[in-house]
Amino acid sequence: MKIVDLSQDIYEGMKVYPGHLKTVQFEHATHEETAPRFEGGFSFQTTGFILNDNGPTHCDSFSHLDPDPSAETIDQMPLDLFYGPAVCLDVTGFAPRTDITAEDLERAEAGSQVEVRPGDIVLFYTGTWNRFAGDKRYLTDFAGLGESAAEWIVRRQVKTFGVDSPTPDNPASVSYPVHMMCRREHITHYENLANLDQVAGTRFTFAGFPLKLQGGHGGPTRAVALIG
């Protein structure tokens, strides 16, 4: 079994969606500070950090997308949504701040070695993280899924999907049709994935269990692909 890490590093200064809380990381306790508390040479060190629940590699909760008070927070969502058979489609090559259409997704699927099946988790490799990790252009210079692509996800009965960018929507959009589809259909998605080039055009098992943050509107996640 080969395990591919699909998660971005978490560090102070990482790029997060504009308006979200920036990541803060700090030294909390050092070996020098804790050693006097023990005998025999034992000591420990720890790091403190502050995260937005939609900051690093994460999965959106239904409550993040839907203002209905009954919409589930991340800790209430079924674990089945975060695990299962998956494919990754290569949608690189589109101009930044443009829409990827349903026809584009059909061509991407036809040109790959995989078929999207009902109930699959589908990841979309845009190449954003590969090109711009740590660069401010990561937040602006990428193509997003348009309205027809959002409806393609529904029509193909995709269980959950994800992107290697800060949002599946076109960053130039002011209506966010993908997020609106997710609100309407209660289909969730991952943002800020990484290393999708290593799984593009393949079928694998996806595991991306979010932190069980009570009342959280998203869940930071260590996402992986299990191949073989």
Image: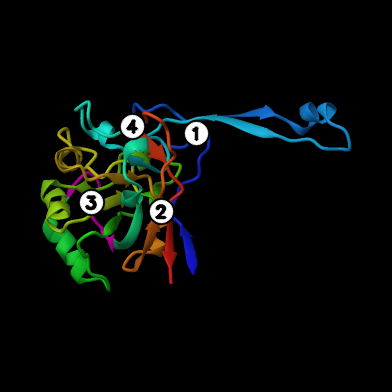
Quadrant assignment, res 39? top right
Above or below 115: residue 21: above
Query: What main secondary structure does the magenta stretch of the protein show?
Result: loop
Please tell me whether mark 2 or mark 3 is closer to you in this view.
2
Q: In front: 3, or 137? A: 3
Q: Nearer the viewer, residue 95 or 205?
A: 205
Q: Is residue 171 left or right of residue 57?
A: left
Task: Give percent across and percent down for residue 109.
Answer: 21, 66
Q: Which residue is mark 4?
A: 217
* The quadrant where residue 107 appears: bottom left
Along the polypeptide, which appears first: circle 2 or circle 3?
3
Q: Is residue 92 magenta?
A: yes
Numbered circle sitting on residue 95: 3
Q: Which mark is residue 130?
A: 2
- In the image, residue 11 sits, relative to residue 79, either above or below, namely above
Q: Secondary structure at mark 3?
A: loop
Badge 3 amino acid: Ala
Tag 1–tag 3 contact (CB < 8 Å) = no
At label 1, the amino acid type is Gly
Q: CA distance from mark 2 to mark 1?
A: 17 Å
Between 101 and 134, the one nearer to me in the picture: 101
* Relative to 47, 194 lies left or right: left
> Considering only order in the chain, which callout, 1 or 4, is on the residue closer to the N terminus?
1
| Bounds of the magenta segment | 89-99
Q: Amino acid at mark 4?
A: His
In the image, which is nearer the foreground, mark 4 or mark 1? 4
Q: Nearer the viewer, residue 131 or 45?
A: 45
Q: Which residue is mark 1?
A: 13
* Distance from Cα at disc 1 to Cα at disc 3: 27 Å
Q: Amino acid at mark 2?
A: Asn
